[in-house]
Structures are given as C-alpha cells and as structure tokens.
Image (spheres, rainbow, N blue to C red):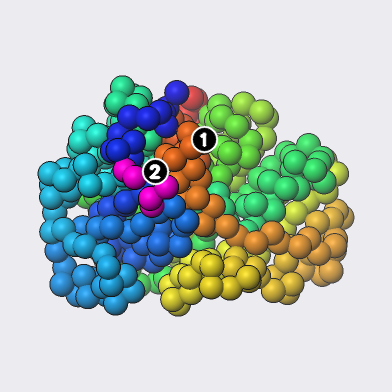
Amino acid sequence: MTGSTTDTGPEAGSAQGAPLRVALIGYGLAGSVFHAPLIAATEGLALDTIVTSNPERQEQARAEFPRVRFAAAPDDLWARADELDLVVIASPNKTHVPLATAALKAGLPVVVDKPLAGTAAEARELAALADERGLLLSVFQNRRWDNDFLTVRKLLAEGELGDVMRFESRFERWRPQPKGGWRESGDPAEIGGLLYDLGSHVVDQALVLFGPAASVYAEADVRRPGAASDDDTFIAITHTSGVRSHLYVSATTAQLGPRFRVLGSRAGYVKYGLDPQEATLREGGRPGTSAEWGVEPESLWGRVGSGESPLTGGGRPEPTLPGAYPAYYAAVAAALRDGGPNPVTALEAAAALDVLEAARRSARENTVVAL
C-alpha cells in the first residue's frame, strides 16, 4: 500500500509522545507561506530545521520560529537523519524527485509539494521506493481543503445536485506582466508553466470528485509578451464515470469567471472568489489564533438552484464550509504516529500527472488523448 505508515523510519526511535521533528527544504513562497506555518500549528509536529542558504530567508524564518535550526543544503539532513522524523520538500519543482529519493533512501518519511514529479512514471517510481522502505510518501495538495471544494464535496455527498453532468473549475488571475523566475521558465527541466502549477490543483480536484480520466483534450497558450511558458490553459477531461470536467488556469483573465460551476440533473452550484486561507497566511494570519480560520463572509457564498443565473438572484445561498488547510498536516501526523491513512498518496499524484502529461501532448498535437 503506497505511503505505508508501518513502524520503520526514525519516528520509531523518538521519545513516545514527543513531537515529530520536521525538516523543511525550501523557504520561498511554498515554504514560508504554507508549509512552515501549517507545520508549526499542528499538534504533534515540531519545525526543527529549515534548509535555506539565503541569509534574508533565514532571518525571516528566525523572526517567526526562533528555535528553528538551519541547514545550508539538503545533504546536511541525510547526515543526521536519526534526529528527524519527517522531511518536507518545498523547493523548486525540478528538485522534487531527486530530493524525495534521497530522503527516502536516508530512511525518512517525506511530504512533497505538488507536483510530485514531472512525469507519472517518476511518481510511480517514488511510490515504489516508499513502499519498499515502508515509509510515508505524501503529496501536499492543499486545495483539497479549500472552503469551496469542501462545499462541493458536501453537496455531492448529499445528492443536492442530482447526477453531475459537467464540472467547471477556474483558477484565473489577471497578471498581464510576467513575474519571471523558474515558475514561468520555458525550460522543460524546470517543470514550470500554469499546466503543472495551477493545473496540478484543478486536475487533482476533478479526479477526487469524479474519478479516473478516460480521455483528455487541452489548449495551452503563451499569451503575454515576454512569457516563456504556458499562461492560459484549458483542460477538458472525460471521466470514466461519464462526467465532463472543463478546467481553466490562466494569468491573462481580465474578467474572472466563477471558481466552480457544477451542473447536475437536479440543480447547479455556482461559486465565485477564492478560498481565503492563502491570503490570510500571506498576511501573517496563523491557524489556531482565531475561531474564524477559513471562514468567508456570507456575501461570498455560492448559490444552488436551477433555471436562473445566480447573478440575477437565481437559486438559494449555500453556506460555504470553512477551509481547512491544517487538516492536511494533522493527517500526516496521525499517519506517522498512529498508522492513519495517507491524506494524499503518490499514486493519486501519479494519476493526476497522467492527465497533465496527456494535456501537454493534446495541446502540442491538437488531438484528444485516450488514457
């Protein structure tokens, strides 16, 4: 079973009841905004070491986590693997596979930020290595705990929409000027572009909701002057369940569409706006400091109904469930400590990468790709 949580690994040697010691590789956007605060807020986890050689990032981290240790390079961690219980990889995409491989070979459980790898084959090789070593390998797909996604899952579980026929998901931004950096690099080795960045989220969500993909069609364009990687991409998935998912990721959308539009045989659900947790984390908010974590105002609730647009008052307001990013690391801690389920397995990530690879081929060859 991928991501085994048996008693192998350094956690078995740590003091019973002591927090699991976590090393975080990378302190850029992913590391500083998402992983470090969420790890530190999770009962049973302790942020022990941050790997960054950047003095400014070290200073930034020390200001919030004064007891944290620093390492200049990942190799420093493997030399003292017996002092750690979990490694979290939040470094650039091209480093995910080699670092996860090294961590697993050092006997350490691993969390890897999405995308786990550049190819599904690499993801499955990592899954096999984790199984062989009896170690947890989990993928940080935090958007499974977005407020709107949790609400969609609730509506589907309760049958409010009937049989879903079409699922539309948009992760759109208006960023007419490229920011540069590896995420927007045209070098395939960097695994950049929106297909693998935001596409990793929307594809994962679609597969969680509606099951495996039977075929994929995609359009990927480079729209902005000076951009080197796809910045306006559409993915159409036909699921084996019969549902069709239409997924949009873009940095060039002057007028943003609904985050979700889910159309069923009884009703539809339309939701605008983004989950508030990322913005809260960026602004310095932390889980556990407020009972309102992940809660959005009623004015942003989506609507459920039929026959009339929600923009003209159609349907009824549907309370949005609170977002719950802390639930991911709570599940990781439970998996390591108690043998609980892996919240996001490497094989689930590999299935999403199958779709992303098919989408890249579809866009390049202007064809539908069967899976």
Q: Which mark is residue 262?
A: none
Q: Closer to the camera, 208 or 54?
A: 54
Q: Would you say 58 lies left or right of 169 here?
A: left
> What crowding class fits label 2: few (fewer than 14 Cα within 10 Å), some (14-19), or many (20 or more)?
few
Residue 189: % across, % down: 21, 45
Q: Are marks 2 and 1 in contact (CB under 8 Å)?
A: no
Callout 2 amino acid: Gln
Up-down relation of residue 85 to residue 101 (above or below): below
Alpha carbons under labels 2 and 1: distance apart: 20 Å
Q: Which residue is at a point 48% across and 37% down the rendered structure image?
A: 338
Residue 137: % across, % down: 37, 36
Residue 321: % across, % down: 69, 59
* Camera-nearest label, 2 or 1: 2
Residue 295: % across, % down: 64, 68
On the question of residue 219 being in view, the answer is no
Q: Closer to the camera, 158 or 313?
A: 158
Instruction: Name the residue beneath numbered marker 2.
Output: 16
Which of the two labelled residues, at mark 2 and mark 1, occupies the earlier sequence position?
2
**Magenta segment: does it hold 15?**
yes
Callout 1 amino acid: Pro
Q: Closer to the camera, 367 or 279?
A: 279
Q: Would you say 154 lies left or right of 177 here?
A: right
Q: Which mark is residue 341?
A: 1
Span shown in magenta: 14-19
Q: Which residue is at a point 44% across and 40% down the rendered structure image?
A: 337
The rendered magenta stretch, by its main secondary structure, is classed as loop
**Secondary structure under the numbered disc 2 in the rendered image:** loop
* Count of numbered tags: 2
Q: Quadrant of residue 229?
A: bottom left
On the question of residue 160 being in view, the answer is yes
**Magenta segment: does it hold 92?**
no
